Amino acid sequence: MPLLSEPDLIVNSDGSVYHLCLKPADLADTVIVVGDPGRVHEISDHFTTIEYTSSNREFNTCTGYYHGRRITALSTGIGTDNCDIVMHELDALANFDLKTRVQNPRLRSLTIIRIGTSGSIQPDVPINRFCLSTHAVGLDNLLHFYKGTPGIIDRELTEAFAAWAPWPADLSKPYFVKGSDRLISLFSPFSVTGITVTAPGFYGPQGRFLRLPLTDPDMIRKLQSFNHNGRRIVNFEMETSALYGLGALMGHEMVTICALIANRATGEYNPDHKTVIKTLIETVLNQITL
């Protein structure tokens, strides 16, 4: 592998990576990522010991111990663009010598679990449940910038969806990518499982119409009606396709589990969802430390 230049892998003067402001020793093998920076503290409040904390922009980090397991809690902010930053800098921390910018001879695989909030698009999947993403379908175009992407995309689902629903030609072609089988098995007993749509925005890309007309007003119906061999699309969010895709390319294990706080099909929304999130955090922490 060629030597990386300083602009390729920017290292701060204290030896930490550019955006996350972390050093390799600050990172645990198990990482819980959340979109909301404030949610990092909701996780770390459960830690018995805290080793390290940092904050830079939307990236808050806390590394500590829960039931003897070393865990890093980290906020990504919103969107696949932020996840591109987070995944590359986590991988750099795990697999590069930051002083020389040379890849380590032995690669380290991280276990990365996203805890988030999401909206169901199926009328029979109620709010206040946990939704486990077996696959993500990316409506973004992030993975198309990486050469190895064709090798990690689920072609069967991608081609089945392309045949099922005509997609506007000026939008990125949706692609499907799978999460970690081991982590899916770990969390599936207490979750609704299904395919998660990762949208590149909160309004139009998720079919919300306020004042601006939508390119495809029928998008949600297309997503709701897709069913391939019993696999259907269950919910919307904004990060998982990037996490699953980059994780697969880099050799990290990924899973997303979200609290469903809205239902787009029934019009329901839970404005007081903190209790559901608290329960989800506690459930995830207990499962990974069994």
Image (spheres, grey):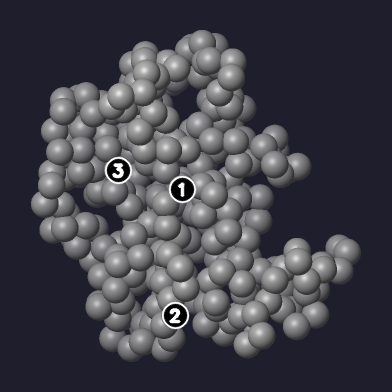
Q: How many labels does the image show?
A: 3
* Residue pictured at 58% horizontal, 53% vertical: 84
Where residue 64 sits: x, y (%)?
39, 82
Where residue 162 sits: x, y (%)?
55, 16
User: Between disc 3 and disc 2, whose residue precedes?
Assistant: 2
Considering only vertical position in the picture, is 157 above or below 262? above
Q: Which amino acid type corresponds to the residue marked 3 in the rendered image?
A: Ser
Are the residues at dot 3 and dot 2 in contact (C-beta closer than 8 Å)?
no
Q: Is 251 positioned to the left or the right of 199 in the image?
A: right
Circle 3: element type: strand
Provide the residue designation for mark 3. Answer: 118
| Residue projecting furthest to the front | 211
- Judge the density around disc 3: few (<14), some (14-19), many (≥20) Cα neighbours within 10 Å: many
Q: Which amino acid type corresponds to the residue marked 2 in the rendered image?
A: Ser
Provide the residue designation for mark 1. Answer: 79
Q: In the image, which is nearer the foreground, mark 1 or mark 3?
A: 1
Provide the residue designation for mark 2. Answer: 54
Q: Is residue 3 visible?
A: yes
Q: Is 72 positioned to the left or the right of 279 in the image?
A: right
Where residue 260 sits: x, y (%)?
23, 43
Foreground residue among 201 and 142: 201
- Judge the density around disc 2: few (<14), some (14-19), many (≥20) Cα neighbours within 10 Å: some
Considering only vertical position in the picture, is 176 above or below 117? above
Circle 2: element type: strand
User: Between disc 2 and disc 1, whose residue precedes?
Assistant: 2
- Judge the density around disc 1: few (<14), some (14-19), many (≥20) Cα neighbours within 10 Å: many
Q: Is 184 positioned to the left or the right of 119 in the image?
A: right
Where residue 130 sits: x, y (%)?
25, 47
Are the residues at dot 1 and dot 3 in contact (C-beta closer than 8 Å)?
no
